[in-house]
């Protein structure tokens, strides 16, 4: 399986919702992209799949911070996932994937490994 | 079989507590119980005696009621002093007669010690122990200038505060070189003295009074051993207490050398049928001058009289935490470091007036005692270390250093063992609290009434709250008053800030009054407050990120990430045409369809992108959002009422629809449910709702603050026979008052239970407008009604807002993880196991 990093354009800045998340489809499966215009970094991308609730919902959680760590709260059972590391704060054994994300003009790009999709439960 | 006689002498704090404990036990059935009280009033809370100089009356301080005594068949004889005990014939004598006993309990307490000073028996020489004493002090203080308290101990300082509150220039005269010699060391005493002097009470230490004679400028003159003197209008002696053992002495029970009725571990005296508890009892050469040990004795004795062979009093902790004249003072365990090898750590900030001392065991592992003056912040933590022998941290000094100096945070309630005593007055352990919670108690008020924790001296209140909050949190219930780490305010306080400062966005609020980025607790709460205050669309750009997914997408998320759709069906009334539309839409989108417990229809299983399409069709057919997702009005359930029902006396459906239309969309601390029944048969179950309305011949009876759900609560009757407009005006006020003062996720039932003054207070505020808020509350709801919009209609009509309802913004595909199975002719999400099989 190839591990080459590929920048994938997933949407435009107009699709982003300030201080909230959207879900995009990528070759690696569903990814949640969060946009916090007043923070640095202002973009985060993590897996959209909530391994505890077993559903594709993380982009629809509330964004915030717990002791300074940027997090999203799963809308299903409210566990917090770090936007930086994907770590679930309530359960050390649970982690969601994180992806590099960048802006190219008004294009939002996520770095996914080609072939990563097969690893994803979805 | 005829009953035996149990007599209790003394109706004070401990005597009363004994009866409360005993009356509940099986053993009580064997006795006819009589209690004698020398005071004319039913047992009252002496610990809070000083509040009598404030607002409190005897009724406020009373520990029980005459009804309680009657209901428990206890013969309560107040104002009747027992003058003799005849042990041989087992009977007691009072001026009114003679009474036989089989078991006798002495709970005679103690009396104030008045030092043998020449002239101490003149008028205006007083003591501080009973309500009658306080009446005498008040009378004596009337119209004069100065008062002196003899004795600088705990009670003396409290008395000095009382004199001050009566408007007197107050002095404290103490024989020892420092204040509170029993509890404090000299440094602590010095800090306390300074603080008290700063408060305007004059403190004279190392002064022995030699005589009291008539004064020149004031009524009395005190002459001291150092030839100085002090003029004063009244003197309160508070130089210690002595056990009230006179009766026992004359009955020739064994008495301690320095007084006190000698008892064993079962609280029994030298006569096996006579027992003594509370401040009159001497156990292992000790008198306990605090209420908690007395209560423990009372419990022990109640158990012994029930034949419990294990029950034993084994001593009690004398740690104390007080606020004296507003100054925190705490003393724990071996405060003076008398244990051999004990070491000390002291922290003394003279500028701030904080003194802290820890006494540590020779091996440095455990805390033996502590002294705190100026700030009791570390008290609870230190007490738990001392009581439970918890191993001290590597740098124990951090426990008393201020946090800015690297001080350790308080010992988390998690670190306490289940056996840790949380409330020593009522002997409630952490384990007891956990069991109460596990048995269904879900808030502080419930725990207090269930376990009695924190209903004694009140000193454990903060710790109790801590433990309860922590335990509830562990069980997934939210409690703390501070909304979250981002806002140091309760919901009510935030509401006030928003309203008063006209704040309209979360960003402004967190910038001015909070910190960080916010979280899934504060954002929805603030979203709800902003909605109540300004009633802007919840998906206005600034508000979008605040909403819980249910509010963001205006639908309830289901376990597989799909959503449900609940259109409003006011009063449960629906036309066949509308029913057909619901059926058709459900069919077209394959939605699971169910009649809810709230008299409407729920359509389950819509994907995000289907929501606006579905709502478009429903709105076209005349439906509007049912707010099943919001912390807002859910349904107004109704019965069929006078239009059809042969018993109905009013049009319950009509009223239900009117109410549902009026309050729909109102954002509130939690969801609100109503019901209207057309007669007293109550088919709409109105008494289980937040607002319940029941028709009468003359109008409507209004019930408030009922609850179904996890902890059902019967609603309280609030007002009767209201006409339509009165009914609505009253509900307006109740709802708006709740919306303003309720805590986050607090249903009206819990709100009322936590409202100080309870139902009576609520009636005052709403029906008699005691806060003068009535018009404002009505105007506020008027605004909200005037600016109502169906949120779904606004979204459906706005292409920008509709964009939000895309499962993937760059791809039309449906969510790949949804797996369905069919059951009873409809589809539902597959169970996890089935999904695995399918995969
Ligand atoms: C659909 C329904 C069950 C049904 O099939 O009948 C239902 C479904 C839910 N209820 Fe309920 N409750 C429903 C009637 C009730 C009732 C009965 C009633 O209203 O007469 C009660 C008890 C009455 C009461 O609230 O006092 C009820 C007490 C609760 C509670 C406990 C509230 C409490 O104070 O103890 C919760 C949990 C909560 O709100 O925190 C809850 C929460 C929920 C949630 C929101 C749980 C969740 O977060 O997913 C369910 C979502 C439904 C959805 O997706 O649409 N539901 N729920 C009923 C919808 C009524 C409606 O038309 O709006
Ligand atoms: C101002 C003040 C503040 C206090 N603050 C605190 C505090 O903060 N924390 C704390 O733990 N404790 C405090 N105490 C002490 C606490 O009030 C006592 O420990 C407690 O009241 C003891 O209860 P008891 O039943 O043993 O005695 P009491 O409450 O004194 O009751 C004894 C009763 O027996 C009656 N009696 C006596 N002899 C007879 C007789 N022969 N016949 C009939 N009746 C008789 C007396 O009239 C009295 O009513 C305070 C006390 C005072 C006065
Ligand atoms: S009772 Fe529980 S499972 Fe049933 S609808 Fe209500 S919340 Fe859901
Ligand atoms: S008509 Fe419904 S309760 Fe009587």
Image: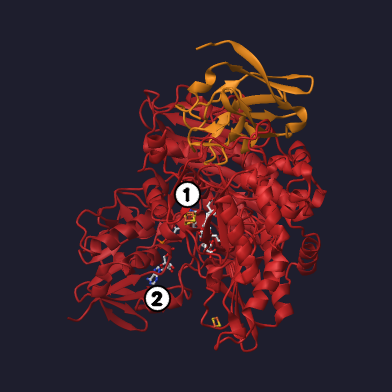
Left or right of residue A110, residue B781 in this image: right
Q: Is residue B31 visible?
A: yes
Judged by depth in the image, the label closer to the viewer, 1 or 2, is 1
Instruction: Give the chain coloured orange.
Output: A
Q: Is residue B258 above or below residue B575?
A: above
Please give the residue where the numbered disc 2 appears in the rendered image.
B69
> Tag 2: Cα neighbours inside 10 Å, few (<14), some, or many (≥20)?
some
Q: Residue at x 61, y 33 (%)?
A: A72
Q: Is residue B405 above or below residue B51?
A: above
Quadrant holding the C terminus of chain B: top left
Q: Is residue B489 visible?
A: no
* Chain letter of disc 1 in the image: B
- Observer-nearest residue: B258 or B501? B501
**Residue B574: x, y in percent?**
63, 70
* Ligand 1 contact, mark 1 (Cβ < 8 Å): no
Left or right of residue B473, residue B215 in this image: right
Corner quadrant of residue B245: bottom left
Corner quadrant of residue B787: bottom right
Q: Residue at x 74, y 67 (%)?
A: B771
Please give the residue where the numbered disc 1 appears in the rendered image.
B828
> Tag 1: Cα neighbours inside 10 Å, few (<14), some, or many (≥20)?
some
Image quarter for ligand 2 = bottom left
Mark 2 residue element: helix
Instruction: Give the chain coloured red.
Output: B
- Observer-nearest residue: B167 or B655? B655
- Observer-nearest residue: B786 or B717? B786
């Amino acid at each position: 399986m190839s591990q080459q990093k590929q920048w994938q354009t997933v949407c435009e800045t107009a699709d982003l919702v300030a201080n909230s998340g959207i879900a995009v489809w990528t070759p690696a499966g569903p990814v949640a992209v969060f946009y916090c215009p007043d923070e640095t970094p202002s973009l985060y991308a993590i897996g959209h799949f909530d391994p505890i609730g077993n559903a594709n919902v993380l982009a629809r959680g509330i964004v915030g911070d717990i002791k300074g760590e940027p997090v999203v709260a799963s809308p299903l059972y409210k566990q917090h996932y770090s936007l930086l590391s994907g770590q679930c704060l309530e359960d050390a054994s649970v982690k969601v994937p994180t992806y590099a994300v960048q802006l190219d003009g008004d294009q939002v790009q996520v770095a996914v490994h080609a072939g990563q999709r097969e690893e994803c439960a979805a | 079989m005829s009953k035996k006689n149990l007599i209790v002498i003394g109706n004070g704090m401990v005597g009363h507590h004994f009866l409360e404990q005993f009356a509940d036990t099986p053993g009580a059935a064997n006795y006819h119980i009589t209690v004698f009280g020398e005071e004319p009033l039913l047992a009252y809370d002496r610990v809070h005696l000083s509040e009598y100089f404030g607002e409190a009356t005897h009724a406020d301080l009373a520990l029980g009621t005459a009804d309680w005594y009657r209901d428990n068949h206890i013969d309560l004889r107040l104002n009747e002093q027992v003058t003799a005990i005849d042990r041989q014939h087992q009977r007691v004598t009072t001026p009114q007669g003679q009474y036989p006993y089989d078991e006798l309990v002495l709970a005679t307490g103690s009396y104030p010690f008045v030092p043998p000073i020449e002239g101490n028996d003149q008028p205006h020489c007083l003591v501080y122990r009973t309500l009658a004493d306080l009446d005498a002090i008040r009378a004596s203080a009337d119209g004069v200038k100065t008062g002196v308290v003899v004795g600088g101990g705990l009670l003396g300082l409290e008395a000095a505060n009382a004199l001050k509150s009566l408007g007197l220039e107050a002095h404290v005269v103490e024989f020892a070189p420092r204040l509170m010699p029993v509890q404090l060391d000299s440094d602590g005493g010095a800090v306390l003295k300074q603080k008290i002097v700063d408060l305007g009470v004059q403190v004279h230490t190392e002064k022995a009074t030699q005589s009291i004679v008539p004064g020149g400028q004031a009524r009395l003159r005190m002459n001291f051993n150092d030839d100085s003197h002090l003029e004063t209008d009244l003197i309160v002696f508070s130089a210690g207490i002595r056990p009230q053992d006179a009766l026992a002495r004359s009955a020739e029970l064994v008495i301690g050398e320095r007084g006190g009725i000698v008892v064993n571990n079962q609280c029994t005296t030298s006569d096996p049928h006579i027992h003594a508890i509370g401040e009159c009892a001497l156990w292992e050469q000790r008198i306990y001058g605090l209420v908690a040990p007395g209560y423990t004795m009372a419990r022990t004795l109640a158990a012994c009289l029930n034949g419990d062979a294990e029950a034993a009093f084994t001593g009690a902790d004398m740690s104390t935490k007080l606020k004296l004249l507003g100054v925190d003072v705490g003393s724990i365990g071996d405060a003076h470091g008398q244990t051999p090898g004990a070491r000390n750590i002291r922290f003394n900030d003279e500028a701030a007036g904080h003194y802290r001392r820890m006494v540590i065991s020779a091996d440095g592992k455990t805390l033996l005692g502590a002294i705190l003056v100026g700030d009791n912040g570390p008290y609870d933590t230190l007490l738990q270390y001392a009581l439970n022998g918890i191993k001290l941290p590597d740098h124990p000094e951090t426990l008393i250093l201020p946090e800015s100096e690297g001080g350790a945070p308080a010992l988390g309630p998690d670190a306490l063992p289940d056996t840790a005593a949380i409330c020593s007055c009522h002997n409630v352990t952490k384990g007891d609290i956990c069991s109460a919670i596990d048995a269904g108690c879900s808030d502080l008020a419930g725990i207090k009434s269930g376990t009695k924790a924190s209903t004694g001296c009140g000193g454990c209140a903060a710790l109790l709250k801590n433990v309860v909050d922590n335990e509830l949190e562990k069980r997934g219930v939210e409690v703390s008053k501070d909304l979250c780490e981002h806002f140091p305010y309760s919901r009510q306080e935030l509401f006030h800030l928003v309203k008063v400062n006209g704040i309209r966005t979360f960003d402004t609020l967190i910038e001015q009054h909070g910190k960080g980025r916010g979280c899934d607790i504060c954002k929805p709460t603030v979203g709800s407050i902003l909605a109540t205050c300004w009633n802007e669309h919840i998906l206005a750009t600034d508000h979008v990120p605040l909403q819980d997914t249910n509010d963001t997408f205006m639908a309830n998320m289901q376990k597989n990430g799909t959503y449900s759709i609940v259109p409003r069906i006011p009063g449960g009334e629906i036309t066949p045409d509308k029913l057909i539309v619901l059926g058709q839409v459900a069919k077209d989108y394959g939605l699971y369809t169910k009649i809810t417990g709230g008299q409407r229809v729920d359509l389950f299983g819509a994907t995000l992108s289907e929501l606006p399409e579905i709502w478009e069709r429903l709105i076209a057919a005349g439906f509007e959002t049912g707010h099943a997702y919001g912390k807002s009005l859910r349904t107004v359930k109704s019965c069929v009422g006078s239009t059809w029902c042969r018993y109905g006396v009013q049009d319950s459906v009509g009223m239900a629809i009117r109410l549902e239309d009026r309050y729909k969309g109102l954002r509130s601390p939690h969801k609100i449910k109503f019901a209207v029944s057309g007669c007293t048969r109550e088919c709409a179950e109105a008494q289980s709702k937040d607002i319940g309305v029941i028709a009468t011949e003359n109008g409507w009876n209004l019930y408030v603050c009922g609850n179904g759900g996890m902890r059902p609560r019967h609603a309280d009757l609030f007002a009767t026979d209201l006409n339509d407009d009165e009914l609505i005006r009253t509900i307006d006020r109740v709802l708006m008052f709740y919306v303003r003062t309720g805590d986050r996720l607090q249903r009206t039932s819990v709100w009322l239970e936590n409202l100080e003054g309870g139902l009576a207070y609520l009636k005052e505020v709403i029906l008699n407008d005691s806060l003068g808020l009535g018009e404002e509350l009505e105007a506020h709801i008027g605004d909200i009604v005037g600016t109502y919009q169906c949120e779904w209609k606004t979204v459906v009509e706005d292409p920008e807002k509709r964009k939000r309802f895309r499962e993937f913004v760059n791809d039309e595909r449906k969510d790949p993880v949804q797996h369905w199975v069919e059951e009873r002719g409809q589809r539902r999400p597959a169970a996890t196991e089935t999904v695995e099989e399918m995969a």
